[in-house]
Image: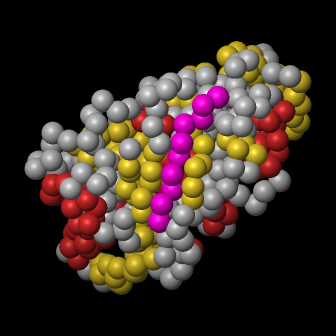
Amino acid sequence: MIFSLDAFPVNNNILENNDYNGQMIFAALSDPLFKFDGTSIIANACKEYITSKNGKEHTFVLRDNLYFSDGKKVTAQDYQKSINHLLLSTSPLALLLANISALSSDGLQLKVLLKRPDFQFYKILSRSNFTPCRKKITSGRFEIKSYKKDEICLRPNIFHREFTKNQSDIKFARITDPETELNLYNKRTIDFTSNTSFRHNNVQKYRKSLCKYPSFITMSLSFINKDLLQPKYKKLRRIILYSINRTEIAKSFNNIFTPTSSYVLRGNNIDLFIPTNSHFPIDIRVGYDDFYPNKKVLEIIKKQLAKHGINIVLVKDNFYKPNYNYDMKLSLYFPDFLDDSAFYRSTYFNALVYFANKHNLYFKSLQKQLYKQKISTSVFKRLDRLLLKNALIIPLFSMNSIYLSRNLDFSFQKLNYESL
């Protein structure tokens, strides 16, 4: 099977990779303790999970049939080594593990002691990053066969517990031009198109081959310029928030996006309105990575905001080396966590706390409540309302992965893609 991708991983280290396409590839190589099955977090490499009454001590008991791609048996110590690697790294993923006080392993048992109670901690370990690996030796359904500039080839791990003889190699080809990609699909050269570049105007034409796969990806506009985070620009931020017509954008993309006005709490929509005297003549530089449909979305937003005197200047950014020479950034946001506190524990949110504290927005006192023994839904709602009220980040859509498939019976479960 041959997949096309419009970009290859930013970081080739399976433990530290945190970009979308990289996660897609490395998910096939990983074997995390838990995984997401489309509805909930379920046990994967872990067969038993025990949490103490105080929420601080977690014991994970591994399956006894876990093997690396070289045939060596996987132990709890291998998972401990991966976690320790990230704890000592400069990767943003280390923030996910900041609550860990101590780690120990014995045979098939991994024990984690936390500084603060967290009954949701196991969800963190469903990320594909938390997997045993030794250089090119991996423990997932596949292993790396070859890694070239524009081609990554994976072959089945014959020692994996779910290996079957009819499994074939998987090849990822880097194809940056959407038209070239579509031509190759029509010529049967590739079997799956890239889900980040399939053109919306082809939805009806290829509807029999079109697949949608739910993901955690959301699209949002984030304020990057710290000066615009100040309270005196609150009106401007709110005008931008309320002037964006998500429904209009979604329709122009044949409704493959799901509009949202709430970043975390699904269904908790607010009444959108345009403030009176909302004309605010100003130029705003908005950065975007040059992947479809980012620029197309911004072109529509540019027209919508022009009605209120806000001129959007589009700035093409370098995905691999961001320039940050803009005021806002359109991003496909990949949550740092899979639990309900995803956004509020992210690197971006911590930056907002830093700036907001200087302007008496009271983020920090609310953030501390996240570390209580039981997570309070009321705290999340207060934070969510506060973020929307101050328009520090503007949520646009929750997104599905959209691609063309020559094999409609194929499931990403075969890649362990649910680990995303």
Q: Nearer the viewer, residue 141 or 248?
A: 141
**Residue drawn at (29%, 81%), measured in percent from left and top?**
311
Residue 209 visible in this rendered orientation of the protein: yes
Q: Residue at x 23, y 77 (%)?
A: 306
State the residue at coordinates (80%, 49%).
Answer: 85
Residue 191, placed above or below residue 35: below
**Magenta stretch containing residue 126, yes or no?**
no
Q: Is residue 47 above or below residue 120?
A: above
Q: Which residues are magenta?
A: 150-159
- Is 156 a magenta residue? yes
Relative image position of residue 89 (x, y in whole percent): 78, 56
Does 332 appear above or below 102? below
Q: Is residue 222 left or right of residue 201?
A: right
Q: Is residue 5 left or right of residue 320?
A: left
x, y percent for residue 272: 28, 52
Q: Is residue 261 visible?
A: no
Question: Residue 141, located in which quarter of the rendered image?
Answer: top right
Q: Nearer the viewer, residue 265 or 99?
A: 99
| Magenta span dominant secondary structure | strand
Q: How many marks?
A: 0
